[in-house]
């Protein structure tokens, strides 16, 4: 175990405020050596490093500002192009809509004309067929009338009689139903 | 009966867990309470064992032991007229650590600094800022190394003053038959010689700059007078200004020396020396926490603050020398 042993030294304490000249010389010499060494070998190195870093940071800030400026320009150009593209797209859509509407109108008009033409054609065909049918019925009615008359009377009819009989028979027939009320 | 139990849902405290923890009793608080209890129990213990009024040690009673002895510079050896003592050892240690640290960092500087390099760069920035803010460009370039060296040299001197080292050659202890100096905390700047020589150097430098800036002794003396003073009060003001000029040397010296000396004495007293002087072990135990608090206060704040004040005042005085009045 360590044991403390006080030396028999009583002190007035005046040494506390009395400068030790030897220590002063030591401090001055050692401090000046430190100053010389630090000034020559240390501070310049640290200073250069800090300057280099400051320059590097300044360069990086400049580069970043340039990049930001370029990015802003690119963004502005992109926005402009986007706006142009939107405008063009709107125009194309508008044009397509107009063309579509025009085509639709034309198609409807063509279809209507075709329908009218087909209806007219059908009407004409129906009328022709009706007329043919009426003529055939007329002939059939005349023949039947002559034949019936000849059987009833038992004699042959002259042409004048036949014509009269046919006309009388046909006069009693109404063909207006077949012709749609027109005949 | 099944031995398998369903796992408790997350967030649900398990049995015996959490329910014992008192709300608000954090770990730090529990440690503080334990230390406070230990401290109080120690006081009771020492009073119980040694009594409320113990006897002084013989060395104290006879006046052989005085607290200031530990600041005495006992010459260890001499080489011709050069004496070597613990003050010199601390100055050499401070220089070695200062140069070693600065060289180490300066020759391993990286673009991305580590903590040590960042600290050194901060010190460099701080001291170059002191020089730039108080001096013109030429003087700043000239005196920045002095200001920076003063700062780092005093700071390191102060800081190693808080490391206990076996340097008390007046108070030895025996270890395995060897008589070794006791451990103590000592700083070279607790001796007035340390701050005085640095203050003298600064005083001479800023006086020389004032002499140069004001073209000789007459201009020098005129520059001490504040502008706009006329009439019979002029001689009185002149005397006061001359006194205050020379008091810069005293204030620069005493501020550093007295702070360090008082700090070290306070640490020693609170750390147990006062108990030794009054002969009461319980007083030693009572004051011990205050000793730790003062130690931390001195090491963390005062060491840096005094180095900063000395170097910034150097910059201010140098700047004042060339710009005053």
Image (cartoon, coloured by chain):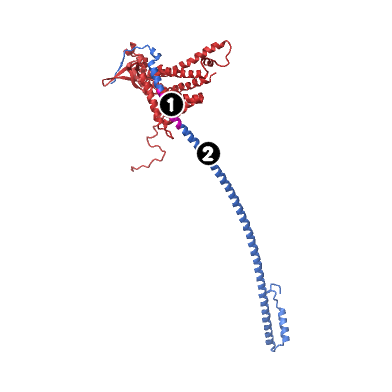
Chain colours: A blue, B red
Q: CA distance from mark 1 to mark 2?
A: 37 Å
Query: Looking at this view, is B221 or B29 the one in front?
Result: B221
Numbered badge on residue B277: none
Q: Nearer the viewer, mark 1 or mark 2?
A: 1
Tell me the residue that label 2 is attached to. A65
**Is tag 1's residue or tag 2's residue first in the polypeptide sequence?**
1
Quarter in which the N terminus of chain B is drawn = top left
Q: Position of residue A71 (x, y in %)?
A: 53, 43
Range of residues picked out in magenta: A33-49
- Is disc 2 placed on a helix, strand or loop? helix
Q: Residue at x 50, y 35 (%)?
A: A58
Q: Using the image, name the chain to which the residue with label 2 belongs.
A: A
Q: Position of residue B203 (x, y in %)?
A: 46, 18
**Same subunit: marks 1 and 2:** yes
In the visual, does A63 lie left or right of A147? left
Q: Using the image, name the chain to which the residue with label 1 belongs.
A: A
Q: Residue at x 72, y 83 (%)?
A: A165
- Against B325, residue A137 (above or below) is below
Tell me the residue that label 1 is attached to. A39
- Is disc 1 placed on a helix, strand or loop? helix
Query: Looking at this view, is A107 or B230 the one in front?
Result: B230
In the visual, does A170 lie left or right of B217? right
Q: Label 2: few (<14), some or many (≥20) within 10 Å? A: few
């Amino acid at each position: 175990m360590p044991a403390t042993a006080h030396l028999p030294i009583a002190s007035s304490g005046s040494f506390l405020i009395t400068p030790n000249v030897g220590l002063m010389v030591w401090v001055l010499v050692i401090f000046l050596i430190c100053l010389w060494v630090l000034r020559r070998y240390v501070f310049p190195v640290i200073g250069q490093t800090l300057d280099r870093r400051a320059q590097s940071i300044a360069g990086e800030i400049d580069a970043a500002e340039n990049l930001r400026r370029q990015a802003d320009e690119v963004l502005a150009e992109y926005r402009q192009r986007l706006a142009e593209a939107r405008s063009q797209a709107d125009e194309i859509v508008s044009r397509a809509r107009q063309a579509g509407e025009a085509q639709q109108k034309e198609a409807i008009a063509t279809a209507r004309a075709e329908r009218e033409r087909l209806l007219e054609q059908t009407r004409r065909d129906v009328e022709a067929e009706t007329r043919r049918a009426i003529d055939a019925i007329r002939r059939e009615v005349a023949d039947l009338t002559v034949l019936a008359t000849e059987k009833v009377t038992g004699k042959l009819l002259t042409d004048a009689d036949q014509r009269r009989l046919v006309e009388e028979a046909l006069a009693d027939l109404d063909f207006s139903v077949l012709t749609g009320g027109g005949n | 009966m099944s031995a398998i139990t369903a796992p408790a849902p997350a967030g649900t405290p398990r049995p015996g867990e959490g329910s014992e923890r008192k709300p608000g009793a954090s770990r730090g608080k529990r440690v503080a309470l334990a230390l406070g209890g230990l401290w109080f129990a120690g006081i009771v213990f020492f009073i119980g064992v040694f009594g409320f009024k113990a006897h002084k040690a013989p060395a104290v009673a006879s006046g052989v032991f005085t607290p200031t002895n530990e600041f005495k510079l006992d010459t260890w050896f001499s080489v011709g007229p050069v004496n070597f003592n613990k003050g010199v050892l601390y100055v050499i240690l401070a220089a070695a650590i200062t140069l070693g640290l600065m060289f180490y960092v300066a020759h391993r500087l990286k673009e991305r600094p580590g903590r040590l390099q960042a600290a050194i760069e901060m010190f460099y920035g701080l001291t170059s800022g002191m020089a730039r803010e108080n001096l013109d460009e030429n003087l700043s370039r000239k005196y920045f190394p002095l200001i920076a060296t003063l700062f780092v040299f005093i700071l390191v001197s102060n800081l190693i003053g808080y490391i206990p080292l076996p340097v008390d050659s007046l108070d030895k202890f025996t270890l395995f038959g060897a008589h070794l100096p006791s451990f103590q905390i000592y700083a070279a700047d607790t001796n007035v010689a340390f701050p005085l020589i640095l203050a003298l150097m600064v005083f001479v430098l800023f006086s020389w700059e004032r002499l140069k800036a004001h073209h000789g002794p007459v201009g020098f003396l005129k520059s001490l007078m504040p502008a706009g003073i006329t009439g019979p009060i002029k001689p009185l003001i002149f005397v006061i200004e001359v006194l205050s000029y020379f008091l810069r040397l005293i204030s620069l010296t005493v501020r550093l020396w007295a702070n360090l000396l008082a700090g070290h004495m306070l640490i020693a007293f609170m750390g147990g020396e006062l108990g030794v002087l009054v002969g009461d072990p319980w007083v030693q135990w009572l004051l011990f926490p205050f000793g730790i608090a003062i130690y931390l206060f001195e090491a963390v704040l005062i060491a840096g603050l005094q180095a900063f004040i000395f170097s910034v005042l150097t910059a201010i005085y140098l700047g004042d020398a060339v710009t005053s009045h």
